Amino acid sequence: MALQRLRVLIVGCGLSGSAIRHFLAEKGALSRFDLHFWESSDRLGGRFATSYFTDQESGRVAFTDTAAQYLTRFTEDFGFVFDRLEEDRVLIRIPNAHHVIEGMKAEHHALKHYVPPRGYQSVVEHFLTHSYGESASASSAPAKVNLSRRLISLTPSMTDHTVAVVGHESSGNEIRDTFDAVVLTTPVPITKEILSRTNLLHSKVQNWSPDTVDNTVESFLSGTGSYSQRYAFSAFYRLNKHSAIALNSHIANNNGIMVKYDFEDDMIRFVSIENYKQGYGLPLDHESSKVKEFTEGDVMSILLHSSIPYAIDKQQQQTCSSDGTSITNTQQLERVVQEFLNKIHAKYFPFLHKEGHHSFSADKAVLNFWDISQITRPTHSILPTGNHLALLSPNQEGNQVKIILGGDYMRGSNFENCLHVAKGISDRLLSM
């Protein structure tokens, strides 16, 4: 008789959430679980977000990664993950990345750096679909992903050790379901909001015993810092003959620099010609000095990241109103978009408006505001050594923990830290 599969809800379909499935697959354990993912946005990725553009004439696809830019490997942990992502061309390593990225920290020059040739969303998609170590029958059961579905509340049962959840879909439908375990990979503000609705902020954190304060989840989460804020602006340009030649010359004249940190501009902090992730501007192979050049019909994708002070200032301007409510000021947003376009055309890529292609304009422009970007102080400093997640005990039965908290706020906002958190969660699920 087959064992009943454990129904698990994972809230948040970004890197941490999707990597949980990856580590369960590594253990050959997917057949033990019925995994469900709820993602509040209408796309996968979370803060591993990618904006795509397809040219209707040529069918060529370009993209910008609007949150993470490139991955830096700080340790030798998770070598098998990096190896397989490279083997499957989900990530590619950029040799001598500091020759491509101007302004990279000097202490990072000797480290390994990776980019996704299909955008960071493809990393999440890979973790959700590939099943290393699994049998064919187990790998044929993909994760159940529900987009545009927001978790509203969760209520642990005191009798059968399940968790009842309520969610809302963007269509207006209310969803009610019951799971054997719930994992929240959501950022701290959203996690606190969800738990507060059923008084779970006063639950105990089983694997945290502070000396000076009570071990409630509210005290635990108060130990995290705030999140940084940024605008990410994407602009896509279909190149004509003149602009392709000008762009190739621009890259050559800048010694192959495709990405730049700008520490002097009050508005912009980071500029990237994102096409380098698809090999543009880079050597065609390890033995050749010839680079992959842009040609007529290619789509140049440009990404600008604002400075944190600029983002905070503009966001405050567009959300103020006479009665104190939060509003969206369309005119203010249009001014922000125009400011970004002005930076592209006047400061960073003025050749786009030189004689021969003076009317050159963006075919698509996308403005993203990240009010929750990178965590400023992770909880790792207050967790016991080796633990990368918080286990909630809503009642006295500590061995019946069914709510798990984990996200980048546990260790810090980088790729390896998210993998550490995901592995910790997968190990905990395997122990149930």
Image (spheres, rainbow, N blue to C red):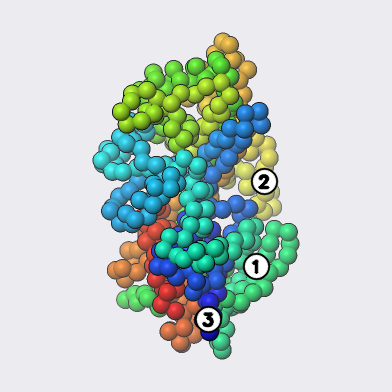
Task: Tell me the amino acid under the disc marked 3.
Answer: Ala
The disc, 1 or 3, on the residue closer to the chain's N-terminal end is 3
**Which element type, helix, strand or loop, lies under badge 2?**
loop
Measured along the vertical axis of the image, is residue 278 above or below residue 290? below
Task: Tell me the amino acid under the disc marked 1.
Answer: Gly
Q: CA distance from mark 2 to mark 1?
A: 25 Å
- Tell me the crowding category of disc 1: few under 14, some 14 to 19, or many 20 or more residues within 10 angstroms, Cα based: some
Q: Nearer the viewer, residue 304 or 19?
A: 19
Where residue 2 is drawn, which disc sits there?
3
Left or right of 416 on screen, residue 195: right
* Quarter occupied by the C terminus: bottom left
Residue 207 pos. (x, y %): 37, 76
Q: Nearer the viewer, residue 140 or 126?
A: 140
Left or right of 45 on screen, residue 210: left
Residue under pointer 1: 167
* Mark in the foreground, 2 or 3: 3
Measured along the vertical axis of the image, is residue 359 above or below residue 339? above
The disc, 2 or 3, on the residue closer to the chain's N-terminal end is 3
Q: CA distance from mark 2 to mark 3?
A: 53 Å
**Which element type, helix, strand or loop, lies under badge 1?**
strand
Residue under pointer 2: 328
Work out which residue is located at the far top of the displayed protein and give it: 355
- Assess whether mark 3 and mark 1 are in contact (beta carbons under 8 angstroms): no
- Tell me the crowding category of disc 3: few under 14, some 14 to 19, or many 20 or more residues within 10 angstroms, Cα based: few
Q: Nearer the viewer, residue 64 or 283?
A: 283
Task: Tell me the amino acid under the disc marked 2.
Answer: Thr
* Mark in the foreground, 1 or 3: 3
Residue 224's quadrant in the figure? bottom left
